[in-house]
Image (cartoon, rainbow, N blue to C red):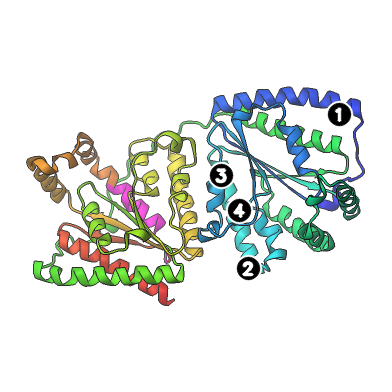
Amino acid sequence: MLETVNLSASLDKEEFRAAMEALDLRLGLAQRRLREAGIPALVIVEGWDAAGKGSTLGRLLQPLDPRGFKVHHVGPATPLEGMFPPMWRFWNLLPARGALAVYNHSWYRRVWNEPMENGASPEAVRAAYERIRVFERQLADDGAVIVKFFLHISREEQARRFKALKKDPAFAWKVGAAEKARHKQYDAYLALAEDMLRETSTPHAPWTMVPATDERLRNVRVAETLAAALEGALESPAPAVSPAPAPTPRRTGPLDRVDLDQGLERETYAKRLPKLQQELRRLQHLCYLRRRPVVLAFEGWDAAGKGGAIKRLTRELDPRGYEVIPVAAPDGVEKTHHHLWRFWRSLPKAGHFTVFDRTWYGRVLVERVEGYARPEEWQRAYREINEFEAELVEHGMVVLKYWMHISRDEQLRRFEAREATPEKRWKITEEDWRNREKWDAYEAAVSAMIEQTSSAQAPWTIVAGNDKRHARIAVLQTAVDRIAAALEG
């Protein structure tokens, strides 16, 4: 691919001045319209050392309102960043809707720099390619504009620029041991760049290869490409509002196979509970020593006992090593990002536990049933959630997912008991009663969720919850069994 780039092309001063005057106006207008339309934009700049990435960005951003963009310089992962899945730090650097993020280096370090510098295996590189493709596709599906540039110069041009930089004390620091080593291995890096461009240039996130020998031509090419991409996104028709799918006939689903009559005697519960809690505490310490993170995700009917189960689950854990995150409807800045953004940000670092009281499954439950997400959005979310969990498991995270299940009659009994008990009345709201009226719609959504997202690595555990003692022991026993198996594997 790179052999097709004309590195001898140039632009004279007059052509450059005229082109940039027009492009500056287009970029400024596009940025304002982008903000009004609530479209996020990502600009990725990769390329050779001394290819002019810094000066290109400086010129590109001149006509833009600095309040509407942020520049990220991406270096190797820090020790803290290394304690999370590889894409975690990039989810944390995403722009809000209507904003622009610029990346000087990016997630492409994983497939261009690291194979040479860290000896990443071919298998690790292939996995990184897939993570990148998934990441960019999910963002593009959510409406983001992704513009990627590779600034290309020859080996001889790079050597000439290194020599010029070293002559000036103000810039000599830019040519260090790492830059010199990469220059000596130019051909190997070139082969990696070719693979990177071929593997990750897609219709929704194409690469633009920029001849960077001539500064004026380079700056015009980058500005022209970005202006066209932003204008193209603004001119695209808004997604059509799809009609809600017609109700489907009631059918047998995974919830129908749950025996809700299961119970546990008080004496048996009193014996098993402390033993399981102590064993989970022991496993928590082993996870810390072996740097295995654990996610425990709870979903279930209102009044199904999530809070009680979580309380018993965490009672004996070291509080320095776990966090419980109650999840409500997205609010504020959460609404300006991809629906998975807030969950990526809340993942546990290596060796820690995170308990989610409600989860990323809200997209295919409440947002589906209440119409907060369009049908194409929640239907797409099954795949996105499976990809999300696959990345967590690939990183070594233990993922446990619980659906706390009770009967409709048991829910009514608990609702009425809460209303009749002053100290528990706060637990019951008008929304709970309103949701109950949609039981059948939620039941269909839960069945589809379990069927679409239960995998060998991240299976759903449906907990029979009519008897609270049975449910709490089931939650703890599953956690102990799954975490112990993961540590032994």
**Magenta span: chief secondary structure:** helix
Q: Is residue 147 above or below residue 483?
A: above
| Residue 266 in the image, given as x and y percentages of width and height | 9, 66
Disc 1 target residue: 16
Q: Is residue 450 magenta?
A: yes
The residues bearing labels 3 and 2 have C-alpha atoms spaced at a distance of 26 Å
Q: Is residue 215 left or right of residue 35?
A: right
Disc 2 target residue: 123
The residues bearing labels 4 and 1 have C-alpha atoms spaced at a distance of 35 Å
Disc 4 target residue: 132
Disc 3 target residue: 93
Q: Residue at x 52, y 32 (%)?
A: 239
Q: Residue furthest left?
A: 420
Q: Tell me if label 4 and label 2 are in contact, CB under 8 Å.
A: no
The quarter holding residue 292 reads bottom left
In the rendered structure, which amino acid carries the disc numbered 2?
Answer: Glu
Crowd tier of the residue under label 1, counting other residues whose Cα lies within 10 Å: few below 14, some 14–19, many 20 or above:
some
Q: Is residue 366 left or right of residue 137?
A: left
In the rendered structure, which amino acid carries the disc numbered 4?
Answer: Ile
The residues bearing labels 2 and 1 have C-alpha atoms spaced at a distance of 45 Å
The region drawn magenta spans 443-456
